[in-house]
Amino acid sequence: MVRALDMRIFKERKLGDTMGKPVIITCAPTGAIHTPSMSPHLPVTPSEIAEASIEAAEAGAAIIHLHARDPQDGRPDPRPETFMQFLPRIKQATDAVLNISTGGGFNMTMDERLLAATTTSAEMASLNMGSMNFGTFPLLEKYSDWKHEWEPALLAKTKDFIFPNTFATIEYALKALGERHGTRFEFECYDLGHLYNVAYFVDKGLIKPPFFIQMVFGILGGMGADHDNMSHLHMTAKKLFGEDNYEWSVLAAGRHQMPFATQAAMLGGNLRVGLEDSLYIGRGELAKSNAEQVRRIRTILEALGLSVATPAEARQRLALKGGDQVAF
């Protein structure tokens, strides 16, 4: 039995503390880490991304975290016109919250990373809360047959790469996107210090509750996928922000995806799944779709007596402006 199901988890929460609170499931269908050669099921074209997102929403995801890819070769693509090939279609088919990434892809400027979200006046967007070494180069050891030359070249570059998210660029994003467009953020925290960066901007009045913290585990250069790390971040967030000012969620890379998602829900948090974070549904078995991962975690949650949040419930808890207030 996975460690996430250990009974000690229940000792960290008051009995019934949040058992009645529906779990917000986020699905990240494609991302910018995995490349087309790694799975035939990774959505690449706008049509594939739209279909994957709609299926994930129908399976129970309240939030869809979106990146775009060049339709020709699948590389990360920051252009708003590429996003606009799938955003209206998803919005027309589902009421899920559409969360546009400002992480973008490696070597993009902050203006490039923000452009899709500002152009579309996004309801929600991700925002990385600190600079870090972001190493995906170990993936080179797992694959040898590449569809495109850019794939191994991009992975190799991350051995000497710092993903920059300075105080200045974070403040710029909070003002350019948050203040001007009413966009709320998913604050991505890859390390303990990133929580303290959130606290700094809370103290400065640039982040206002209720805010949404996404704790990220298992990326080389960030926090290791250790359940004790999750417990420590959970307790630190409670000390920094109190009980009622924020919602928290967890994602973990690769084989850690489902155990960490399960533990987060058992601790009263929310979770993220999707092919951006893991290409697999089980040991050595590629997930055939994002919806398959959403259905798997939903089955686990319901077996534990937990319920799944609707998009309307997610909007209310995160104080989002609503899907009718975007520019697509």
Image (tube, rainbow, N blue to C red):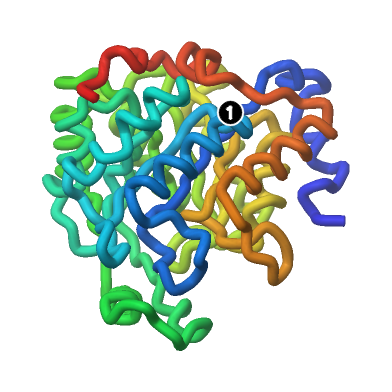
**In terms of image quadrants, where is residue 266?**
top right
Question: Residue sitting at 35 percent across and 31 percent down?
Answer: 89
Which amino acid type corresponds to the residue marked 1 in the rendered image?
Ile
Location of residue 91 (image quadrant) = top left
Q: Nearest the camera: 323 or 305?
A: 323
User: In which image quadrant can residue 262 be found?
Assistant: top right
Residue drawn at 66 percent across, 21 percent down: 22
Answer left or right for 106 relative to 259.
left
Q: Residues within 10 Å of mark 1 (few under 14, many from 20)?
A: many
Residue that numbered label 1 is attached to: 24
Indicate the position of residue 34 as horizontal and vertical percent values: 43, 65
Residue 139 x/y as whole percent: 47, 77
- Whether residue 11 is visible to the viewer of this picture, yes or no, is yes
User: Is residue 142 rendered to the left or right of residue 140?
Assistant: right
Residue furthest to the front in view is 47
Instruction: Identify the image quadrant of the C terminus.
Output: top left
Secondary structure beneath dot 1 equals loop
